[in-house]
Image (spheres, coloured by chain):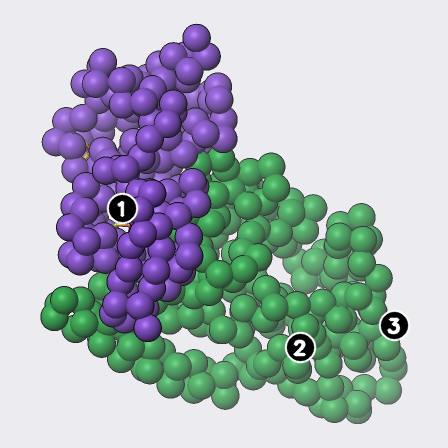
Chain colours: A purple, B green
Amino acid sequence: MATDFTLNGKPASFDGDPETPLLYVLRDHLGLTGTKYGCGIAQCGACTVHLDGKNRRSCVTPVSMVSGRQVTTIEGVAGKEAEAVHNAWVAIDVPQCGFCQSGQVMSAIGLLRIKKKPSDSDIDAAMAGNICRCATYVRIRQAIHDAAHALEA
Amino acid sequence: MKAGALALGAAALTLGIAIAGQAREQKVEGLRPVSAFAGIADPGARSVAIFTEMGKVIQHPRCVNCHPRTDRPLQGDAQLPHDPPVSRGPADRGMAGLECGTCHGPRNVAFANGKGSVPGHPEWHAAPIAMAWEGKTLGQICQQIKDRKRNGGKSLDQIAEHNAHDSLVGWGWNPGPGRTPVPGTQAQFGELTRAWVASGAKCPAG
Ligand code: FES
Ligand code: FES
């Protein structure tokens, strides 16, 4: 039976094994390769998407779990938090190689939707599951503060 | 897709092996039934002996790992700190942006690329700090379980019911591929708890 869900605001469907990770469906079947495969076991955060608006690791999300729900990826994420994070990221050139960054950006947006003015420790706690091999952590934290300030203004 | 199907096939195979392994371990590491304690004439001594048997479940890593004494749960039989480094947060369900539900879903999910699984349950969360068991003796845990201020306001009968039927407690016997289940069955654990309560709910010393 096909799994139907909403992907970036549009209807989407996957007709295959319902245990297939959402990450594989996004990348291999629906052609949305912005969401990255890092570890496949919920250890790195590269595969972070939003499920009904909240951060979710798509590598450990069987597609059956998103049936009837809203999935948002880096390609479709929108709204004031997304815009603020995008601008803040560009302003200080957060990425180095970039591989982890779509996951970082999705996690940062997910955080700012819940916590408008996160402290350093709020940021560290929220981003603890997003690993960056290039160690851009200091810029990530700065950009999240910058985005929060921009949202306040 | 072929690689994905292969990976899933491998995961299914692992699951089969894991289940076979669990069955073997349960035989070795079972729980003694309530009847095994009938020969202890003194009710207080019987009660302590029954709780000590319950301790095989209570002090198992599957249970203690989510009853941490710090804000960070533990993982695995080696009881290492949870990785990624999560924190219990204000409602024991994680921190804003990295909640338990960021990775844990309503059921165990086998990894698609190898052995193991991410555990899950609809109510997946850490036990409140008042219910911390990590690093405590069985006697201390016993006193804690009886103390309404530290047991979620439960009567002893409610504790027995909780141990017998709560499905998050029950997860311990169904922890998913890659994890050792707690010994025995939840039904046995429930019966032991009822017998412990009926015999006066006495705690081991220390
Ligand atoms: S790919 Fe999902 S957390 Fe690493
Ligand atoms: S920018 Fe290279 S891994 Fe994060």
Local packing at callout 1 (Cα closer than 10 Å; few below 14, some 14-19, many 20+) is: many
- Name the residue nearer the viewer: B46 or B34: B34
Element under label 2? helix
Residue B129: x percent and y percent?
Answer: 64, 45
Q: Which residue is mark 1?
A: A47
Work out whether mark 2 precedes mark 3 in sequence or the reverse, and give the earlier one. 2
Which element carries disc 3, helix, strand or loop?
loop
Chain under numbered label 2: B
For marks 3 and 1, give the CA distance.
Answer: 52 Å
Pinpoint residue A44: horizontal percent, then vertical percent.
28, 45
Residue type at numbered disc 2: Phe
Give B161 or B5, whichever is nearer the viewer.
B5
Query: Where does label 2 land, which residue?
Result: B189
x and y, in percent, of residue A37 in the image: 20, 49
Q: Is mark 2 within 8 Å of ligand 1?
A: no
Q: Are marks 3 and 1 on the same chain?
A: no
Q: Which label number is shown at residue B137?
A: none
Task: Please tell me whether residue B105 is drawn above or below residue A150 in the rendered image.
Answer: below
Q: Quadrant of the C terminus of chain B?
A: bottom right
Check mark 1 vs ligand 1: CB closer than 8 Å? yes or no.
yes
Under mark 3, the amino acid is Gly
Three-letter amino acid code at the position of disc 1:
Cys
Chain label for disc 3? B
Query: Which residue sits at x=59%, y=71%?
Result: B170
Report the residue at 68% width, 87% height from top: B33
In the image, which disc is placed on residue B200?
Answer: 3
| Residue extending farthest front | A11
